[in-house]
Image: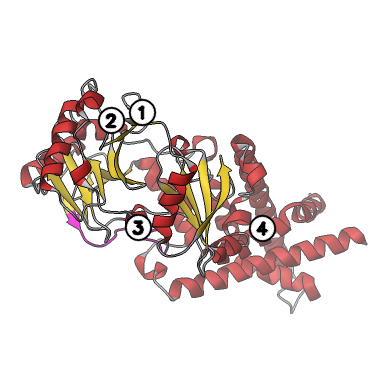
């Protein structure tokens, strides 16, 4: 039995040892360079203030027949104010607020104007249109494609992606991000373009290579402990040379390597494990009755009359059957307005309504807790309203809009500990603070890398002999 386990461990090490070493090294890179993404606050910094003087004169016909509006957004697009109603079942597309005309998409010249406005003084050049590429698999909705791609002549060699349908800038990458991600997130997640085009195949590859890595590590731990228990008198290991180094690395870092690979496997929620439910029911209850086209038209006309000159984006935030609007400026500040364009901060009665829907008292938090916190390049919105229901479900609510920011049921809370805590070692605020988090991760990941590489070397040398 011992001989069979030894052979199994050896050949599994040849099969996935280098892959595990790559996971470790690329994980270290990911500590400092995240996968490219464009946040709403970053995008808002480059938007032009909405030209309300050109708004709403011809909107009546466009909105009169809309019984309900699921979601909407108002922003400037290539020098004109545009109402984006999305592509949901009750949507009516995108409407020019000045002419009332429905927009089918944007031209190459309009996309260039959007990119030029985003790039400010730097020239831009077109790189063609793409449906999807290495940097747009995630974070870009299907109803934004295809995308215009532009190169910006700036020191960072920025590339911008502009939606051909909504005209929004939906992705941004820089040369350093692209370079380091080829050493970080792409090999770590096996995020290669040709493989990611086949989502089901990619999922199975990640799951089963992780399973093999877990099996390899479990066998190695067993063999390492058995060798320690049956060591020769006067020595604490029966091995010498590279075998000794592999044995020591396994005893010191084997358990961490196992939990790290296992938590990476659980990030995929294989076979439905730790797959939490969504918050569709709660969101519908909080919103109440649908917003009608007539209500939206009235709200836009009220905003046009007030002509707030610092607003760059307006989105809907219905609550308790009433229409409210969230206005944003370039600095990322947000405030809530009612349907007449007046300031309407969330009041005590509305907080009580939210608490009744979600089933518990609301508490304002200004710092993250054990489930809702910023992790280096992955920030959360604070302050927030927190609620823990009788069943243990945790809800986090935006104190500006009253919208639900996050829901963590039992499965989601399990995912937080089984994946996040074990994989990123962020199980406590004192641990995830820097520089102590860097020191701990470098120590453990270097040990896991040494374990993987010495194992590959030993197995390969044995097979060649």
Sequence-wise first label, 4 or 3: 4
Sequence-wise first label, 2 or 1: 2
Q: Nearer the viewer, residue 19 or 146?
A: 146
Residue 248 position within the rendered picture, expressed as x and y whole percent measured from the top left: 68, 71
The structure residue drawn at horizontal position 70% and vertical position 75%, both measured from the top left corner, is 236
240 to the left or right of 216 = right
The structure residue drawn at horizontal position 64% and vertical position 48%, both measured from the top left corner, is 192
Q: Nearer the viewer, residue 443 or 326?
A: 326
Residue 93 position within the rendered picture, expressed as x and y whole percent measured from the top left: 35, 30
Identify the secondary structure beneath mark 3: loop
Sequence-wise first label, 2 or 3: 3
Q: Residues within 10 Å of mark 4 (few under 14, many from 20)?
A: many
137 to the left or right of 197 = left
Residue of label 1: 88
- Magenta segment main secondary structure: loop
Residue 70: mark in rendering: 2
Which quadrant of the structure image shows residue 330? bottom left
């Amino acid at each position: 039995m011992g001989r069979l386990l030894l052979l199994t461990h050896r050949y599994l090490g040849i099969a996935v040892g280098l892959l595990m070493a790559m996971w470790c090294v690329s994980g270290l890179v990911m500590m400092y360079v995240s996968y490219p993404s464009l946040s709403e606050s970053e995008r808002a910094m480059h938007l032009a203030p909405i030209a309300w003087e050109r708004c709403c004169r011809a909107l009546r016909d466009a909105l009169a027949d809309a019984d309900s509006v699921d979601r909407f957004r108002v922003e400037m697009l290539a020098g004109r104010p545009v109402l984006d109603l999305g592509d949901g079942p009750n949507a009516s597309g995108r409407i020019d607020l000045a002419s009332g005309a429905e927009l089918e998409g944007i031209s190459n010249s309009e996309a260039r104007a959007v990119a030029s406005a985003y790039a400010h003084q730097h020239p831009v050049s077109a790189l063609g249109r793409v449906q999807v590429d290495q940097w747009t698999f995630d974070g870009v909705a299907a109803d934004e494609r295809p995308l215009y791609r532009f190169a910006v002549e700036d020191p960072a060699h920025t590339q911008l992606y502009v939606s051909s349908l909504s005209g929004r800038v939906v992705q941004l990458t820089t040369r350093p991000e692209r370079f380091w991600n080829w050493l970080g997130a792409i090999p770590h997640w096996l995020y290669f373009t040709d493989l990611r085009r086949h989502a089901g195949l990619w999922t199975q590859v990640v799951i089963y290579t992780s399973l093999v890595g877990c099996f390899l590590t479990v066998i190695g731990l067993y063999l390492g402990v058995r060798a320690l228990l049956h060591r020769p008198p006067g020595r604490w290991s029966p091995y010498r040379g590279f075998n000794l180094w592999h044995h020591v690395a396994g005893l010191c870092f084997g358990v961490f390597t196992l939990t790290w690979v296992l938590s990476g496997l659980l990030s995929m929620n294989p076979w439905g494990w730790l797959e939490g439910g969504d918050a569709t029911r709660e969101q519908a209850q909080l919103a109440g009755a649908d917003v009608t086209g007539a209500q939206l038209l009235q709200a836009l006309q009220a905003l046009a009359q007030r002509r707030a000159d610092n607003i760059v984006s307006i989105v809907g935030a219905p609550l308790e059957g009433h229409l409210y609007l969230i206005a944003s400026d370039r600095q990322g500040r947000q405030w809530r307005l009612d349907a007449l364009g007046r300031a309407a901060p969330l009041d005590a009665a509305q907080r009580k309504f939210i608490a009744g829907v979600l089933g518990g008292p609301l508490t304002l938090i200004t710092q993250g807790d054990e489930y809702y916190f910023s992790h280096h390049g992955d920030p959360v919105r604070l302050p927030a309203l927190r609620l823990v229901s009788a069943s243990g479900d945790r809800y986090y609510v935006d104190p500006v809009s009253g919208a639900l920011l996050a829901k963590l049921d039992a499965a989601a809370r399990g995912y937080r500990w089984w994946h996040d805590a074990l994989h990123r070692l962020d199980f406590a605020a004192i641990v995830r603070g820097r520089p102590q988090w860097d020191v701990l991760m470098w120590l453990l990941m270097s040990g896991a890398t040494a374990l993987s590489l010495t194992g590959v070397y030993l197995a390969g040398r044995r097979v060649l002999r």
